[in-house]
Amino acid sequence: MKDISAHAWELHRRAVVIDGHSDILMALADGTTRLGSQLAVPDPSNWVSPFPPLEATEVPPGPLTPTQHTLCFGSAGQYSIPQFVAGGITVQVCAIYIDDKYLGCALQRGLEMAWWLHHEVRANPGFELVRQAVDIPRLKQEGKTGAILSLEGLEALGNDLRFLDIYAQLGLRMASLTHNRRNLFADGPQPGVRTGGLTELGRQAICRMNELGIVVDLVHTNETCFWEILELVKAPVAISHLSPYAFARWRGEPWPCPRFNPHQDRAALEAVARNGGVVGLIYFGFETIDAVVENIEHLLELIGPDHVGLGSDFWGAQFAPRGLEEISQVPRLTDRLVARGHADEIVLKLLGGNFLRLFQQAWTDPRVGGSR
Ligand SMILES: [Zn+2]
């Protein structure tokens, strides 16, 4: 990328870069991709019928303009190990999410996705499963990349909390109780179920996550659960991939919402900051890389430089911003932040320093390889 200043490159090469959320494990389990292989985006001027060449993509209503990558691939190809290396990514969080069609065999599907991540670690030298916080600076030093296993919704436990321990042994280090749907642990934010909070099992899950040193991810919680969890939790939390839409949804506001509402969202975001948590900003839903940067800056204004990170939602996000269509382009974010006058140490925190600090504080259980 020629459009990146020498100073931004130098800073990016020094940075531990951590991306708080992605969904490639579904594609791995479905056999549609492998982590070691990169899909290249063809030059659109060479496209011939049938169009689009791979994944059929519906153009959404509203102001979003799909990028060439979106039109060509959808979410496919948004990252791979070669793209991690090109983009200076140290660690990617990879989430297990159970699609509706797998709810009847959620435990098996979840374990299958965990198996695939382990398989890709075995198959790709220089790519590791991160189990302890000390692994992360070591990977950086050795020029390697890694992945953190997370759950997006506890459905993958098959409704049995004991399996949280098994997933912890498999490397699980972060989990949200729900995706959008209601489950045995909590209500999600989907319309019609937003009034309920945590169930008794959900409360037990939070306690067990604290004991095991698994970061509680507040993403996709409804408002009731959000405050209940913050009350219960004994360690710093994450919002692994926050979109400006997330809180607007609580208020029933329409998509898209270009920025976090400083009046109404401030209380929730400040509570996460007081807890010592980190908010990873999603890239999905922003039309351009500059819009991503503006929202990062808005989060900085709301909660300061110690609680903001990256949470791309790559492989879950079809409509990636122009200029940030896939992960090797992340140095452009660094470049924009530097160009807009952000100090080096703040950029380093945003790129991964804050998530690293969170993991150092939260991954505490020696039985699952905690850092203290
Ligand atoms: Zn999500």
Image (tube, rainbow, N blue to C red):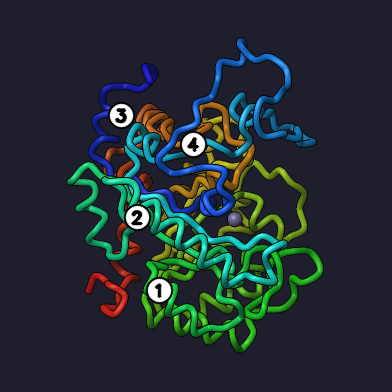
Residue at (29%, 80%) from the top-left corner?
Answer: 367
The quadrant the N terminus occupies is top left
Q: Where 277 falls versus 329 (above or below)?
A: below
**What residue type is disc 3 on?**
Ala
In this rendered view, identify the residue nearer to me: 346 or 3.
3
* Label 4 CA crowd tier, 10 Å (few <14, some 14–19, many 20+): some
Circle 2 SS class: helix
Contact between labelled residues 4 and 1, with CB atoms less than 8 Å apart: no
CA distance for labels 1 and 3: 37 Å
Q: Nearer the viewer, mark 1 or mark 3?
A: 1
Q: Which image quadrant is residue 80 in?
A: top left
Q: Where 348 falls versus 2 (above or below)?
A: below
The answer to whether residue 349 shows anywhere in this view is no
CA distance for labels 3 and 2: 19 Å
In the picture of the structure, the residue carrying the numbered disc 4 is: 293
**What residue type is disc 2 on?**
Asn
* Label 2 CA crowd tier, 10 Å (few <14, some 14–19, many 20+): many
CA distance for labels 3 and 4: 15 Å
The quadrant the C terminus occupies is bottom left
Q: Reading the chain from its start, which is encountered first: label 2 or label 1? A: 1
Whole-percent x, y for residue 243 in the image: 59, 50
**What residue type is disc 1 on?**
Ala
